[in-house]
Image (cartoon, rainbow, N blue to C red):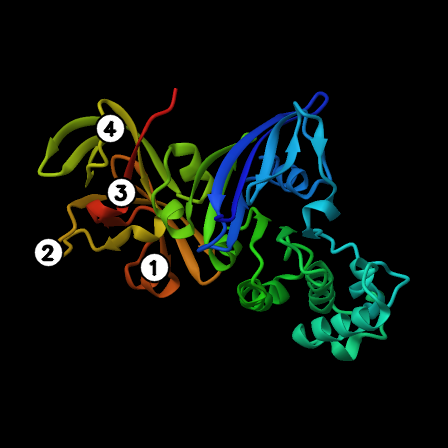
Amino acid sequence: MERALTFDVVRRFLRGPVISARASWSLERDPVTVLFGPSGAGKTTVLRALAGLDRPEAGSITFAGETWFDAEKRLSLSSQARGVGFLFQEYALFPHLTVAANLAFGLHRLARAEREARVAEVAERFGIADLLPRRPGQLSGGQRQRVALGRALAPRPRLLLLDEPLSALDAPTREALRGELRHVLESAGVPAVVVTHDRTEALALGDRLAVLVDGAVRQVGPVHEVFSSPVDAEVARVVGTENVFPSRLLRREDGLVIVRAGSAELVAVDPGGIEDEAYACVRAEDVVLEPPEGHPSSALNRLTGVVAARQPEGPLVRITVGCGVSLVALVTRASAERLHLLPGQRVSAVVKASSIRVVPRRA
């Protein structure tokens, strides 16, 4: 039987939100799924329900054909019975225990010799064998993360759940460990569900993205597909599409749609299903800025306007151009200087039709 995870859960909070999330996906080809969304969207609530740490008021959860939770039947398996490993946001290592004892915590059912062998195996795999006698307070943030991940994987879980696994680290360590964590998840051979609200982490860690908005799963698909092709404007905003314009269909031509956004006309690939009102979504990095005279190109959208704002963002600069719509572009500092992109400067914004995603406008 193909391994699949299916959940349809409702969780109500007193004087708070209602989380009503449902989704289903295979765990065979794409082992790492990222639950992605803004704070308060319900990501951790869903994760804790999958782990058996939180009991929803209604719904069900199944894994590989096995029922883990069924509210109507009053069935709820424990975390141990589900065989899940859980990595908490703050790692939750036992401060009074050594690294070796932390790794062995979930191995109490094994004989002593087997337990010690498994601890040694995990420690070697995660490069923490020299840390076994130490306690968590003597470790760096990166070392604590490796120990926590090793402890979660030591019992050989059927499913690994990680709640914001990099958020407790400082920015340089977080950047350094992204690739390492992805390698560990790939090599572990255990399907994983990772919660994050960080776009870079979602891209770096996930094979699949499940986007939560207001307590509901709005889109599930390959990571790059969801980021480049959001199903609606809310998902577009959540995944970081900076430009989302209310639009109206003008006409169709040769597999393209022409929509009016503000006072601008935009040409996009026809997605089908657009009859009148829609949203046109453009990622800031897909906008190319050129001198107003420009030069010939294959791009079908060339909007001439004036730089309205300039905001440095590390090595990049966020440029807002008034060109019938308020269009945001991300360019390098060198490009911003070369084009003299200062407020009041005339400029052309060039966007390929394939870079504009037109989605239905929700009521």
Labels 1, 4: front one: 4
Look at discs 4 and 2 and give the one toward the viewer: 4
Residue 321 falls left or right of residue 24: left
Residue 36 sits above or below residue 75 on the image: below
Q: Give the number of the mark in front: 3 or 2.
A: 3
Of the two numbered discs 4 and 2 on the same chain, state the one appearing first in sequence: 4
Residue lying at 70% horizontally and 25% vertically, measured from the top left:
13
Kindly tell me whether residue 151 is visible in this rendering. yes
Q: Position of residue 209 (x, y in %)?
A: 47, 47
**Image position, residue 85 (x, y; %):** 68, 53
Q: Are marks 3 and 1 in contact (CB under 8 Å)?
A: no
Find disc 2 in the rendering and name its residue: 296
Cβ atoms under marks 1 and 4 closer than 8 Å: no
C-alpha distance separating marks 2 and 1: 21 Å
Circle 1: residue type: Ala
Q: CA distance from mark 4 to mark 3?
A: 16 Å
Q: Is residue 38 left or right of residue 265?
A: right
